[in-house]
Image (cartoon, helix red, strand yellow):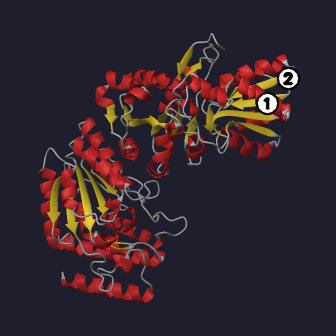
């Protein structure tokens, strides 16, 4: 994957907003003093009248977004995942989720790939928090193509969305003419017979890398990209689990409550098989260059490959 | 509506509060009663609303930031014709239209779900901002408790409203001086409330008696006509107003009247009504 073009999904988010802002006059973007980091600064430049900087007040930003949506706006509320899902959780739950408002939360800087800023800013808990809110659609795109498609789908679909983007450049893996984004539908990227790797976000490209390495060892891994954590494509995952008999989940998130949790919940009801959850192992992150942290926390191709080999 | 009619209506709103909380065997009569006059003034005099068209995009908005006083709002909405008054007797019952705290999907006339303190004002700011951004003439009103303003989020929202000069926003603080654990100045004093809102770039209007229709009328007129800043009406009220044994008693913040108390309360209000 070393020669593949890399783009951070926060960048894709910013570009998608500019494109959609021209089409949807009622699309507005809210920030909490992080427009340059969340990449919504591009929208601000293109549509200054529809960009609202709330200052460093994420809870208020979510409330304002809720109020705007009741009047017919399509608000995108942007900040880091830590503050969107963490600090503002209860406002998202009560002021946006409970009334099922049409608010889109664009959370950037998710996971350990935040890098040098360290554990205080590395949110590994947001998927778990957001997917427990009734009616909340939770999407974690794997690359630039998917991120842009997800933002468009969120605009075109009524209801609250949590969109999770990263700070760190990730390989573009979905730039093929057959690619189609459908909310709640997983993507079978590689067929296999010995085990299934269900991955999300930046771990999708790592999983493909790991599958190559496993193939060299004679292990045939199926790879499924789950961009929508909620609603989860339970059918696709169960069908694959039934075929391979072993499932590995891979995500840049705590192994508690995220993709791994969601997959285990689904499989325990329909097709109980052994599951290895790869992710951040119930620890806080730390400072360091993103690439080094991804390697250290074994979320790159080598790390996922190594953990699967140890498990098999 | 003239002042006498407004007073009579507010008294009927109070009866509805007692009926609803008695039927629910729970709920918050104290702060509903302190705000009964402002609810009445807003829905029967001040706001541009149509109960037959509760989703009219051009209507004025009201967000009950102190959502626990939903019985007061519900009673007002019922009397105003948004839904049958019989609904009040099913307050908080399983499957009822009237939830413990306001829910827009259950109840016509509710502009935003509230109940978790501090959040309503931010959503009201969002509505006022929408009107400004889209050249709409509707106004947005939000009612906060004096205990509620201990929530930090209130001041995030106030800072934004002041910064954006949202003069189409009217924040009302129901200063009945009591919260669950005691008087607000003893628990964690929010005073001086007026100076705080001034510091957040609000036009502050102090109302000496927020249970007086004429004073409310003057305050809302001033707020409506003041341009360039959001208005904050800080109104002194009496918690439990109108029911002899509930007045200024912190115990009636979140306690419902039993059958005997219900009878006395209704008699109290009946007498007040006859005197008007």
Asked which secondary structure carries label 2, the reply is: loop
The image position of residue B206, as x and y in percent, is 15, 63
As drawn, B266 above or below B133: below
Towards the viewer: A312 or B1: A312
Q: Image point 27% across, 47% down: which residue?
A: B159
Mark 2 sits on what residue?
A219
As drawn, B111 above or below A127: below
Residue A308's disc number: 1
Towards the viewer: B268 or B87: B268
As drawn, A138 above or below A15: below
Few, some or many C-alpha atoms within 10 Å of disc 2 (few <14, some 14-19, many ≥20)? some
Q: Residue furthest top?
A: A3
Asked if the residue at tag 2 contacts the one at tag 1, i.e. Cβ–Cβ closer than 8 Å, the answer is: yes
The image position of residue B73, as x and y in percent, is 34, 65
Provide the chain ID for the residue under circle 2.
A
Residue A159 in view (yes/no): no
The image position of residue B27, as x and y in percent, is 43, 72
The image position of residue B165, as x and y in percent, is 20, 43
């Amino acid at each position: 994957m070393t020669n593949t073009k890399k783009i951070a999904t926060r960048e894709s988010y910013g570009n998608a907003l500019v494109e959609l802002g021209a089409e949807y006059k009622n699309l507005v973007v809210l920030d909490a003093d992080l427009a340059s980091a969340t990449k919504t600064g591009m929208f601000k430049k293109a549509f200054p009248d529809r960009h609202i900087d709330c200052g460093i007040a994420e809870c208020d930003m979510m409330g304002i977004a809720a109020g705007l949506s009741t009047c017919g706006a399509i608000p995108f509320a942007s900040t880091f995942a830590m503050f969107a899902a963490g600090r503002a959780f209860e406002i998202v739950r009560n002021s946006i989720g409970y009334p099922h408002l049409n608010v889109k939360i664009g959370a950037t800087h998710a996971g350990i790939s935040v890098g040098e800023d360290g554990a205080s800013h590395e949110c590994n808990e947001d998927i778990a928090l957001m997917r427990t809110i009734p009616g909340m659609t939770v999407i974690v795109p794997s690359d630039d193509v998917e991120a842009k498609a997800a933002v468009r789908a969120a605009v075109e679909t009524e209801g609250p969305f949590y969109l999770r983007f990263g700070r760190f450049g990730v390989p573009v893996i979905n730039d093929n003419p057959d690619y189609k984004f459908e909310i709640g539908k997983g993507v079978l990227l590689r067929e296999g017979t010995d085990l299934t790797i269900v991955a999300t976000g930046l771990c999708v490209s790592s999983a493909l890398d790991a599958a190559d390495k496993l193939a060299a060892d004679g292990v045939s891994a199926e790879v499924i990209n789950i961009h929508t954590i909620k609603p989860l494509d339970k059918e696709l995952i169960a069908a694959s689990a039934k075929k391979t008999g072993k499932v590995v989940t891979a995500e840049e998130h705590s192994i508690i409550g995220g993709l791994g949790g969601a997959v285990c919940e689904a499989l325990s009801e329909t097709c109980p098989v052994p599951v290895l959850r790869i992710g951040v192992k119930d620890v806080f992150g730390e400072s360091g260059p993103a690439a080094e942290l991804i390697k250290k926390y074994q979320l790159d191709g080598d790390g996922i490959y190594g953990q699967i080999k140890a498990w098999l | 509506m003239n002042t006498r009619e407004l007073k009579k209506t507010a008294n009927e709103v109070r009866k509805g509060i007692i009926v609803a909380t008695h039927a629910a065997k729970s709920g918050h009569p104290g702060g509903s009663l302190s705000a009964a006059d402002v609810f009445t003034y807003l829905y029967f005099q001040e706001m541009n609303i149509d109960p037959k068209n509760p989703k009219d995009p051009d209507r004025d908005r009201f967000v009950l930031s102190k959502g626990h006083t939903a019985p007061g709002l519900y009673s007002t909405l019922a009397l105003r014709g948004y839904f049958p008054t019989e609904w009040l007797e099913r307050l908080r019952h399983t499957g009822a239209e009237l939830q413990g705290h306001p829910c827009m999907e259950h109840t016509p006339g509710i502009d935003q779900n509230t109940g978790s303190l501090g959040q309503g004002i931010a959503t009201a700011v969002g509505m006022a901002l929408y009107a400004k951004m889209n050249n709409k003439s509707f106004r947005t009103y939000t009612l906060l408790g004096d205990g509620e303003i201990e929530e930090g989020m209130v001041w995030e929202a106030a800072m934004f409203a002041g910064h954006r000069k949202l003069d189409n926003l009217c924040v009302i603080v129901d200063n009945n001086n009591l919260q669950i654990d005691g008087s607000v100045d003893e628990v964690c004093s929010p005073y001086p409330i007026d100076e705080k809102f001034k510091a957040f770039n609000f036009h502050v209007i102090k109302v000496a008696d927020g249970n007086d229709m004429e004073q409310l009328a003057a305050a809302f007129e001033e707020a409506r006509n003041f341009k360039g800043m959001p208005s904050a009406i800080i109104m002194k009220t009496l918690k439990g107003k109108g029911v002899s044994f509930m007045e200024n008693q912190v115990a009636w913040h979140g306690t419902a009247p039993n059958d005997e108390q219900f009878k006395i309360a209704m008699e109290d209000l009946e007498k007040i009504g006859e005197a008007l």
